[in-house]
Every structure is written in structure tokens, then in C-alpha cells.
Image (cartoon, rainbow, N blue to C red):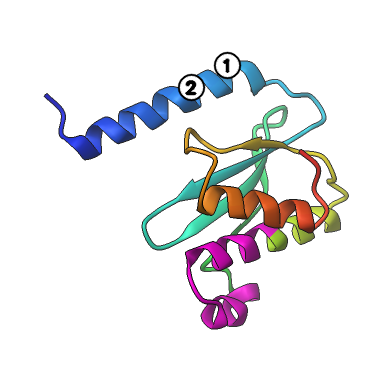
Amino acid sequence: MPDKVEQKRVTRQRRHKHFMKKYRTTGPRPRLVVFRSNKHIYAQIVDDVQQRTLMGASSLSQAIAEEVAQSKGKLAVAKLVGKHVAKLAKEKNITQVVFDRAGYLYHGRVKALAEGAREGGLEF
């Protein structure tokens, strides 16, 4: 019998697998993929057609290190990461993405990152 942490991981992976079945071939729209750990949050824009990562940002990124240090709480950091990844996407002329929450529930830090990306100019 798996422990509680293992069960949560397996459940999240199952939800992500269902998402990937539907949205793997999104054509010209790349995916904005989110990963969250207990301390940090990461976001990448992935092109499934060419099978490569176009750009990425995280709470560890040097470009936003000062703002992350001054912000209070993980929600504020997630919103900063969302705005930063949107800024990077605009530099590469990407305006529309598919939001891939990677099986995480859409609340808390995942929702804050999505809102930050929308404020930065990305469309889901």
C-alpha cells in the first residue's frame, strides 16, 4: 500500500496523463508547463511539434532574483514568475499558449502563476 505522499504523486501523474492525451498536438500553440516544489515554482514554454523547450523561468531565475527576495509569500513569487515567463514569450513573439498545470489543482500558486502570465500578455 503506497503512503500518502506517493499516492498524491501518482494521482497527479494520472491527471497529467489525461491532459497530455488531449493537448499533445496543439499545432502552433506551445504549452506553458508548470512545476511546483515545496520551495520554488518553475514554468517552461514547450513546443511539442519540434519537441524542445523554448524558454523557461523559475523563482530561482537571476533576472527576477531581487523582486523575489523582496516579495512576501509564495503566491507573490508565483505571480512574478508568470509575468517573467510572459515577458520572455513576448520577446519570441509567442502570444497564445495552452496552460498545462501538470496535474496540479488550479488554485494557489498554480493559479497565481497563470494570472501573472495573463497580466504579462499571454492568452490561454
Picture quadrant where residue 71 is located: bottom right
Picture quadrant where residue 86 is located: bottom right
Q: Residue at x 23, y 39 (%)?
A: 5
Identified by mark 1, the residue type is Lys
Residue count near mark 2 (Cα–Cα under 10 Å), binned few <14, some 14–19, many ≥20: few
Q: From the image, tell me which residue sits under label 2.
A: 17
* Residue at the limit of the structure toward the right, as seen here: 93
Nearer to me, 50 or 28 = 28
Magenta span has 97? no
Q: From the image, tell me which residue sits under label 1.
A: 21
The magenta stretch spans which residues?
Answer: 63-82
> Callout 1: helix, strand or loop?
helix
Above/below status of 106 relative to 115: above
Identified by mark 2, the residue type is Lys
> In the rendered image, which quarter contains the C terminus?
top right
Residues at circles 1 and 2 in contact by the CB criterion of under 8 Å: yes
